[in-house]
Amino acid sequence: PTTVYLKDYEPFGYLVEDVHLTFRLAPNATRVLSRIRFAPNPATKTRDFFLNGENVTLISAKIDGAGVAPEITADGLRLEDAPDAPFTFEAEVEIDPAENTALEGLYMSNGMYCTQCEAEGFRKITYYPDRPDVMATFTVRIEGDLPVMLSNGNPAASGEGWAEWHDPWPKPSYLFALVAGELVAHEDRFTTASGRAVDLNLWVRPGDEHKCAFGMEALKKSMRWDEEVYGREYDLDVFNIVAVDDFNMGAMENKGLNIFNSAAVLASPETSTDANFERIEAIIAHEYFHNWTGNRITCRDWFQLCLKEGLTVFRDSQFTADMRSAPVKRISDVIDLRARQFPEDQGPLAHPVRPESFQEINNFYTATVYEKGAEVIGMLKRLVGDEAYAKALDLHFERHDGQACTIEDWLRVFEDATGRDMSQFKRWYSQAGTPRLSVADSYENGTYTLTFRQHTPPTPGQDQKAPQVLPIAVGLLGQNGEEIVPTTLLEMSEAEQSFDFPNMAQRPVPSILRGFSAPVVLEQCWDAERTAFLLAHDTDPFNRWDAGRQLARESLVAQITEGAAPDASYLDGIATLVSDEALDPAFRALMLSGPTQSEIAQILHERRHTPDPDAIFTSAEALGDAKAARLEHLLPAIKDATEIRAPYSPDADQAGKRALWSAALSLETRLDGGAAATAAFESADNMTIQLAALTCLVRAGADEDALAAFEAQWKDDRLVMDKWFAMQIAATAPENALPRARHLTEHPAFDLKNPNRFRAVIGAFAMNHAGFHRADGEGYDFLAGWLITLDAKNPQTAARMCAPFQSWTRYDADRRASMKAALERIAATPDLSRDMSEMVSRLLA
Ligand code: HT7
Ligand code: ZN
């Protein structure tokens, strides 16, 4: 396979003025007619007229009305003698949406036509310069016997069996979308700050109308928020969202026609959990915010993906923090970053936030590009301050509207708006790996000194790392827990740097990296007493939570490596916090959750112990049991105080109470074997409590009746059945995970072609840490076998699911050999996709 390099970027030799497309829809033989006006690009000397095209059959091609016979290759079309002056290119091609199981380009989902063009899917629809720096206006005519036919922009005209759409905003082809089928709309209206009336429609399959209201409210809140916080208004007369069952990712920000995985937009109290509601609100916001950060200002090439994704994730996190609890959102984001991005950054798949080469761009829609990309924006904002950030963003929108940009353009905006030199900061975009930040302190003659050292371990292809700019938020506490120095930002730019705090009457207790101000691993000399002190007193909610997490982590490491008992100071600290009714219930619920088993495996590996997944599982269970015993007397009061019987609302307040109630129920189940969980399951009137109770029963191994009852109740709801499949595999005891997953692949509702269902069974299995890492290696073989099968149909989803193998080198020799063999089995599969072969070769390198 060919490798594409950032350094080789060249603009396309032609500009596209406008595009007219006509679709004659038919499941196995859709005809696509294109009329495209090209003009030589004055910025380039070479004029290679090559149009990307894959899996399309050319019927005819013309230039300025005269037939031409271009050279056709597996990946496109070339005309040697294209004019060196403006001309119109016309083509007619045929494609087969019904056979398209890769879900890229135009495909069918339950009888509905829909598209997914990011990153390089438009070339599966017709011949085109399918690259983000070619921007054009599109007019689209759809012909077919379907009641609803949608495309980007505003509706232009329609009649019996046809509809026309016009998008006045120049856009790259990856933002093209078409949907056609039997759909019904949940309608609403929004008036923008400047008075433009916008029709809002959420299109769903008949029967799903009752799951639309929440998504629509989330859309309106997002539109208002972007006006108020970023000064960004919507720019078309209509905004359409469509829910689709078969979709590779969460959602797609096509201009004026966002397409959503139905799991990322449909919600009702009976069928969706609080976590689903929060995620849906965030994804709707994310896709909507792309209208400015992604669509109006797009990426020059796919190496710049973080320009739109990092910024848009940062914006959706700000939105959620504003709508809900800011500290809880920050803690949840860091849990996610440490669980998904840190392993990526510390393993064979590590790559910079702006990668420099790829074989298959779909493999770079990663936690590093998205979540670390968002952390980088958060650091920028901290470093320059809120006001300068707002000024820089205004300049970005003003200067680059309508352009396809780079990270250099983005950083120049900050340099011009603030006068700061961003050259060292830019290393965050080019250096892979998680910096490790160690800290030492001293106290002499009334001056307290913090000395930091930063070091980033080597990553594939990058042996040496230069120091990065680290914003380190620090607060100092007095011996009685009072705050003597409030949060202060230290700016570190060297490999080693000291910061003095003079005139300190006593040696303070430092609270370092408040709010997780930089995405680093903080290495402090372990001091159990200081950590317990911070758990009790820190005024920074993130560091307070993290102190609890560290105590739990150290307890587990000592349990595993020294046979120690669960740490009493951790249990005491948690007991005090969870019964403190002045604290937000959502925060208290987070305090009760422990580190994941794969996090413990990573820490053991860092400390040169070979992780034993069974020992990790047993120790985590022992800590859970000890927590239940220590908190037993508090559980009734915690549950009583949360009033979960109020009429259901998905708001943050109620969701926080239910989270705490469910965490208490989970501990109670360890004590009563499932009696309380059974009662909760049977009386639940919302999915949050029903699923929480069922999870408790699965963990306790008392699940047979409840699982059957749940299936009987929800067998006709695809999204709820995904939960049923996933949870019973992920939460069961390790020895049951593989037999259960195997058994469920034979369930009549298991469907390889539906990514949600595949992830619910095969993906959930890999989340059962000790079940996946069974000593006999059969878990690895099971995953590899299913990835090989899926790769033949849907390479993108198959390749994304290789991630559980990324930690393979950290385990014992037998497990390592089994994982390597599983990866080699994938690598040796004939006709492996480009997606999969790139992933496996990086994993094995
Ligand atoms: N920009 C989108 C990324 C994307 C995608 C979405 C759905 C299916 C396939 C996809 N490939 C890339 C989604 C986002 O970040 O908002
Ligand atoms: Zn995005």
Image (cartoon, grey):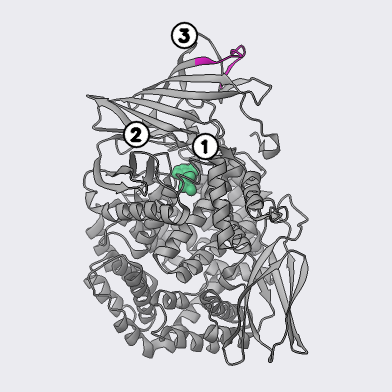
Residue at the (56%, 41%) spot, across then down? 400
Q: Are marks 2 and 1 in contact (CB under 8 Å)?
A: no
Q: What span is colored magenta in the figure? A: 77-88
- Residue 584: in sight, yes or no? yes
Mark 1 lies on residue:
402
Mark 2 Cα shell of 10 Å, populated few (<14), some (14-19), many (≥20):
many
- Disc on the earlier residue, 1 or 3: 3
The extreme front residue here reads: 194
Q: Magenta stretch: residue 33 in it?
A: no
Mark 3 Cα shell of 10 Å, populated few (<14), some (14-19), many (≥20):
few
Q: CA distance from mark 2 to mark 1?
A: 18 Å
Q: Secondary structure at mark 2?
A: strand
- Disc on the earlier residue, 3 or 2: 3
Identify residue type, mark 2.
Answer: Asn
Residue 353 place in picture, x, y as percent:
62, 51
User: Does residue 162 sit above or below 702 in this rendering?
Assistant: above
Q: CA distance from mark 3 to mark 2?
A: 29 Å
Mark 3 lies on residue:
65
Numbered mark located on residue 154 in the image: 2
